[in-house]
Amino acid sequence: MINSFLISFSLKNTYRVNGILYSIKQIPLIGRIIPSSLYSVSGLKVLANVISAIWEVISIFAGKAIYLSIMFFGVQSVFENVQISHSAIFLHALFFLTIVGALMNTYMFNPSNDKYYAMILMRMDAKKYTLTNYGYAILKVIVGFIPFTILFGSLLSLPLWLCAILPFFIAGMKLIAAAIYLIIYDKTGKTVNENGPSAAVWIFIVLLFVAAFGLPAAGIALPEIVFIIAVAAAIVAGVLSCVKIAGFGEYRQMYHKILVNAKSQVQSKQTAVRDRSRKFISADTNIKSSRKGFEYFNDLFIKRHQRILWKSTLKLTAVCICLVLAAIAAVYMLPEIHADVNSLLMVYLPYFVFIMYAINRGIGFTQALFMNCDHSMLTYSFYKQPKSILKLFVIRLREIIKINLPPAVVIGIGLSALLFVSGGTDNPLNYAVFVVSIIALSIFFSVHHLTMYYLLQPYNAGIEMKSGTYKVVSLVTYFVCFAFMQMRLPTFTFGITAICFCVLYCIVASLLIYKLAPQTFRLRV
């Protein structure tokens, strides 16, 4: 057993280390400096192993800390005026959310790559592999939760002994769920994939969330004695479930179904996405273009993909028009809100950074480009020549800006109109700033998404995203835009700054594309 665990842990760690090394290699500029023999460099392997070890420790505690922190502070703020004590609400919510976690995060029924490599490709003993790794996962649950159940429990004045057994209750519920899933497999031969719950499971989970937070809002919570009895019963049932888990003899057959089905589901989803995308592509052979070279190539692409590229933009523009007209009508009909609306408009322009990010079609545009064009064209050497890349980048940038422009123009003009009807401004330039800054933000995100696509091209030939750097940059972009929602700055100051930044970013992006895109715009492996 111990030997099986050490082998499986080593395999998982190797997979993680190689993933870290691969991510380092994909970082722009740094990736060019690091040699192709990256995986054989002992120093980098040591560094990756250190990062892997740190990540393993963080994974034990971080998620649990965040989960209980959200619960604790959420209870403190949301249920501030409820007559039930915060400790009772905390325990009540923990009970129902633990059931959700047991159903959605079993560990045993997660079709991860390391399980596929170990049991399917390397044909390790499935039972030994499962029991040792599942035991380790349950141990991490207990160890990871103990310090935080004691910390937050003590802040809620819960008994220390109750705080100490809560992790065992959570582990017990996971053991019960695993045993139930194994019994279902014994009886029906049906496997469970925790990453793809059935509709019935989703409905049950929604009901559990309603019970967790809806009942306390209505003044109802589990009595502490009932919770304690449930905790004791779950721990006992969890121990008894270990008998079923340890005695189950068909792990190999079960995992073969789970893992193979998971792989086929991923392939089916990719095929379905491609098929659905093709349905929106015009097959009209009468589509022509009078242009030449890459302009001809791009013009045909745009015309044949009108439904993919323009349909959602036109719908979004129509929605923006309706919202703008409704807002103007509301201001006309309610004179008493004029001052409030006017004051909001003069400081809330940063809020629209996130809105323009959310409605920008840049990601959809680049996905359509790759799925229906570039994933085939990048196999030709002429397509990766610097001149070809730069010329096509400029052409595509023009098209993506045109696609994102209609809703931006409507929003910009709409904000100026709202400013006028709500009382106007002493500085007439504010009207122009609203229009130009919103258009500048739209152009900025168009440039940003296309630049990311060319510098970090994230897809392989199978249309799978393989760039960790692309995901990180996307995540950072989201959080930066979200942070702007919390800012309050004078419209004129922020608008002028946004316009200047957009111009500067376009210049920098063009230089980066000129210097780096010929090396970065390629199919990933």
Image (cartoon, helix red, strand yellow):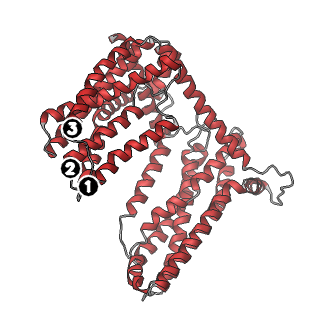
Q: Residues within 10 Å of mark 3 (few under 14, many from 20)?
A: many
Labelled pair 3, 2 in contact (Cβ < 8 Å): no
**Sequence-wise, which precedes: disc 3 or disc 2?**
2
**Could you tell me which residue is drawn at 39 percent across and 64 percent down?**
485
Residue 470 located left or right of residue 159: right
Labelled pair 1, 2 in contact (Cβ < 8 Å): yes
**Sequence-wise, which precedes: disc 1 or disc 2?**
1
* Residue 54 in picture, x, y percent from top left: 30, 32
Residue 91 located left or right of residue 402: left
User: In the rendered image, which quarter is residue 319 located in?
Assistant: bottom right
Q: CA distance from mark 1 to mark 2?
A: 8 Å
Q: Secondary structure at mark 3?
A: helix
Residue 134 located left or right of residue 296: left
**Could you tell me which residue is drawn at 48 percent across and 63 percent down?**
355
Q: Secondary structure at mark 2?
A: helix
- Quarter of the rendering occupied by the C terminus: top right
**Residue marked by disc 2:** 86
Q: Amino acid at mark 2?
A: His
Reply above or below: 3 against 204: above
**Residue marked by disc 3:** 149
* Residue 300 in picture, x, y percent from top left: 77, 54
**Residue marked by disc 1:** 79
- Quarter of the rendering occupied by the N terminus: top left
